[in-house]
Image: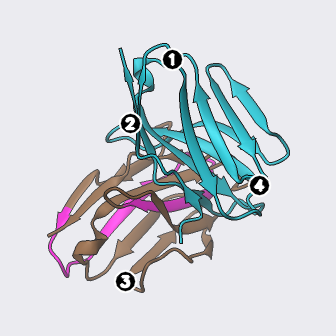
Chain colours: A cyan, B brown
Amino acid sequence: DQQVKQNSPSLSVQEGRISILNCDYTNSMFDYFLWYKKYPAEGPTFLISISSIKDKNEDGRFTVFLNKSAKHLSLHIVPSQPGDSAVYFCAASLVNFNKFYFGSGTKLNVKP
Amino acid sequence: GAGVSQSPSNKVTEKGKDVELRCDPISGHTALYWYRQSLGQGLEFLIYFQGNSAPDKSGLPSDRFSAERTGGSVSTLTIQRTQQEDSAVYLCASSLEGDGSPLHFGNGTRLTVT
């Protein structure tokens, strides 16, 4: 039973445009959400996070939006760059932080 | 090193053999996690350590899987009598306190069971 879902396995975007990656979750008790980026043959690296008390967090070109009523979060990358091409995982955690639940990932391809 | 180190990076083993995977977390990180990623799947939680104790082993898929952590540092994940469905990338991650600090992942061990 997957509690965090990324329904788009892949996304292709032109350089300079906005990339929007989506993530849905089922457990309303989740209160901390993260996005990770993964290049081939490397481990995921932390990108940005948001706590459930916020609905938006911004860091440079990356913004994460949280819609708790819809149990949905999204990652916006603007402007997209070819170096952003990677697999993006969203993750969610309960208050005890002992376990992070990951989605299956979305492979982003930014075309030059 | 500055990051999480995992060894070996690749392991090919015959079905039925035992394997041991090693993780060296970032120095000072008290929380350590094991995940695995099977082909086309997301990251599946296996086990969490806080110090040397494992308060959450709920993700271990069967009793063939075990893990230990010694000295609050190095961890080993052991898979006994490997099966083909154990083939996956096994990822180790550590975090400063296990208090929501972002996880820092190693590059993983790619296990192939033939």
* Residue type, mark 3 in image: Arg
Q: Are circles 3 and 2 on residues that touch, CB within 8 Å?
A: no
Instruction: Find numbered disc 4 in the image and state the secondary structure of the residue it sits on.
Output: loop
Q: Quadrant of residue A92?
A: bottom right
Q: Residues within 10 Å of mark 1 (few under 14, many from 20)?
A: some
Residue type at numbered disc 2: Tyr
Q: Quadrant of the C terminus of chain A?
A: top left
| Residues tagged by mark 3 and mark 2 found on one chain of the structure | no
State the SS at label 2: loop
Q: Residue at x 78, y 60 (%)?
A: A95
On whether disc 4 and disc 2 are found on a single subunit, the reply is yes
**Is the C-beta separation of discs 1 and 3 under 8 Å?**
no
**Callout 3: chain:** B
What numbered label is drawn on residue A17? 1
Label 3: state its secondary structure. loop
Write the residue at 39% across / 58% down. Answer: B41
A48 w.r.t. A98: above or below: above
Mark positioned earlier in the residue sequence (1 or 2): 1
Magenta stretch: includes residue B17: yes
Q: CA distance from mark 1 to mark 4?
A: 30 Å
Q: Residues within 10 Å of mark 4 (few under 14, many from 20)?
A: some
x and y percentages locating residue B38 in the rendered image: 34, 61
> What is the CA distance from the residue labelled 3 to the residue labelled 4?
33 Å
